[in-house]
Amino acid sequence: MDTSGYLQIRCGIYVLNKILPLIMASPFTTKYSKTFDRKLTRDEKVEAFFYIDGFIRNKEAKNVRVVENCLSYKGSTSAFNWNIFVTVDKGEFKIKENDGKSIIEYEIFMYQLFIFVSIAAIIFYVISMNYWLPIMCFGWLGGMNYILSLARHSSMFDEIKDGIDVLLKTGDAPSIEND
């Protein structure tokens, strides 16, 4: 009786039982921030949030809301497009005060990406009974999407903070280009 397939499944389940709690326990969030030279007035914060709102709506963010000093949005619902928000569950822009200066923070949450990739890796393992296929799936599908998301959101945040800088210096918001 060949028990290697059974042992591979048991080993895979054991590894997933050890790895998945670590994944779920550590939040898959990334935070970007920029400190302004001074403390922003209430009107400047409103203008900044208005600019951010227009910027991310232009890139098709969903359910954009502003509450106090926080603008939040939901990611895209379709997984089959090139929208920047596909891998993001939600994002938050906050303006805080520290040492007489304002700080804008952008935080993205990407739980769904890793849940989807984990499920795909399990399915590939069960179908192939080969542990390399799930590792490749997790590393390539999950890892590359994660790296691309970090790069794209970092670039987007740079565009937003540069736009806010122009807005604060000139009083006019820069034009928001379509993707």
Image (cartoon, rainbow, N blue to C red):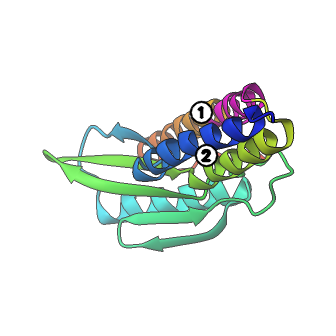
Q: Residue at x 27, y 37 (%)?
A: 37
Q: How many marks?
A: 2
User: Left of 112 or right of it: where is 120?
Assistant: right
- The region drawn magenta spans 131-146
Q: Residue at x 38, y 57 (%)?
A: 94
Which corner quadrant of the image does residue 79 belong to?
bottom right
User: Left of 140 or right of it: where is 1?
Assistant: right
Residue 143 on the magenta segment: yes
Amino acid type, mark 2: Ile
Compared with residue 53, is residue 100 higher up or lower down, i.e. above or below? above
State the residue lying farthest toward the front. Answer: 1
Pointer 2 residue: 13
Compared with residue 136, is residue 178 higher up or lower down, i.e. above or below? below
Question: Which of the pair 7/51 is nearer the observer?
Answer: 7
- Where residue 28 sits in the image (x, y, percent)? 49, 46
Q: Residue at x 85, y 49 (%)?
A: 81
- Where residue 16 sits in the image (x, y, percent)? 57, 44
Q: Residue at x 63, y 43 (%)?
A: 10
- Where residue 55 sits in the image (x, y, percent)? 63, 53
Which corner quadrant of the image does residue 15 belong to?
top right
Dot placed on the residue nearer the N-terminal end, 2 or 1 = 2
Amino acid type, mark 1: Ser
User: Left of 70 or right of it: where is 154?
Assistant: right
Which corner quadrant of the image does residue 61 belong to?
bottom right
- Disc 2: CA contacts within 10 A as few (<14), some (14-19) or many (>=20): few
Q: Secondary structure at mark 1?
A: helix
Residue 155, numbered circle:
1
